[in-house]
Image: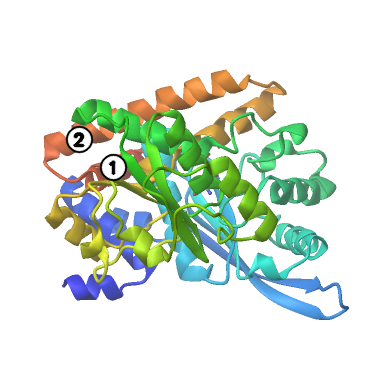
Amino acid sequence: MAELVHEASPFEQVNVLFDRAADRLGISDDLRELLRMPWRELRVEVPVRMDDGRLRVFIGYRVQHNGARGPYKGGVRYHPQADLDEVRALASLMTWKTAIADVPFGGAKGGVQVDPAELSEGELNRLTRMYTQNIAMLIGPTRDIPAPDLNTNAQTMAWMMDAYSRLHGHTPAVVTGKPVELGGSYGREAATGRGAIFALTSWARRAQVNPQGMTMAVQGFGNAGYWAARCAQEAGLRVVAVSTSKGGVYDPEGLDLDRLSKCYKETGSLAAYEQGDQITNAELLALPVDLLCPAALGGVLAGDNADQVRARVILEAANHPVTPAGDEVLNRKGVVVLPDVLVNAGGVIVSYFEWAQNFQEFRWEESRVNEELWLRMRQAVDQVYDRAQQERVTLRDAAFIIAVERVARAVELRGFV
Ligand code: GLU
């Protein structure tokens, strides 16, 4: 059985979690079918005239998983592995994430199968515009609101907003995660990482664990990883390892994140950082640390390597970094897994603030954003923690039970089944 699950695709893996929650809640088979599969999927060709005059055609998707609780919401990633199954998995996770965070959105995700490191700034601009134009009939401020994800950022959102606004008039609320100058929210860039640390400290308070002085390894030095590491240091943890897709660095004395970030920006890798040891991503996952924070790709801790984890707590800043088979191994070892749909919800929570601010043509100070984020994260963690204790299940199962219950209730109330 464990092997079967391990072999499953990312979308099937999310549905293993969904089914377990649906079983517990006694959800009927027909409603289960509706909740499991995406509502709508669009595949588009994205032709781009390259700088050298050649035409390249990329493939993009937008998957809308469930919209019972509000407009579809979710990021757009640029990655060679962003195929339909992966985008479906991520869209489904957004449905459960927005429900747990209790923000009034459904779940969606977009992706373009491309390695953005191979494209110039101009090529990326043209790719983003073409993708936006091709999904424009699905998105809109009350329909579906994209945001940044892996390898996309505030600049990508500015291009998306511009492309959409050319068709429909000035529409900042069509995307979140925009540059502050174009209606973005203060604090949105840091929100996923900051929210992850808020989730950690909220859990620690309930579990009576002191996070101060904990050692932490972070896989990924993109938006989520960088800010999780930064905010962890501010909260008194010692960040001893970080990595990019090319490898990482480990220094038990602690890392200088400013220097690492400068080094990464200037050289595209962490290899030039002189202190500590250079390590591989596989080595990072097995370091003797208190806390391991996967903050990059999915599926990095699976049935065949989860046993090497030496951390006591896993903080899932990435989406689905642990497979169900990996989860089983970690549970058996007594490792506490703080699940993605709870931990990385800070991004979409501050997206919600940004979207609401756009409608009001108003802006909150960063301190207000962070305070409201903290309140919402703490509430979500408390609810998941309580449910896990009541039902004697893991935090992941408790999070899914709450999410599926909320979405199923919304579907029933709307009366379309
Ligand atoms: N891409 C982020 C996520 O996976 C943020 C989504 C959003 O803000 O809509 O949660």
Residue 382 picture location, percent across and down: 27, 28
Residue beneath the point at 62% across and 33% down: 355
Query: Amino acid type of disc 2?
Result: Arg
Query: Amino acid type of disc 1?
Result: Ala
Residue 184 appears in the picture as rendered: yes
Residue beneath the point at 80% across and 47% down: 162
Mark 1, residue position: 399
Quarter of the image for the N terminus: give it. bottom left
Q: Which element type, helix, strand or loop, lies under badge 2?
A: helix
97 vs 253, nearest the viewer: 253
145 vs 291, nearest the viewer: 291
**Residue 92 image-quadrant placement:** bottom left
Mark 2, residue position: 387
Residue beneath the point at 58% across and 66% down: 79
Residue 337 picture location, percent across and down: 26, 47
Q: Are marks 2 and 1 in contact (CB under 8 Å)?
A: yes
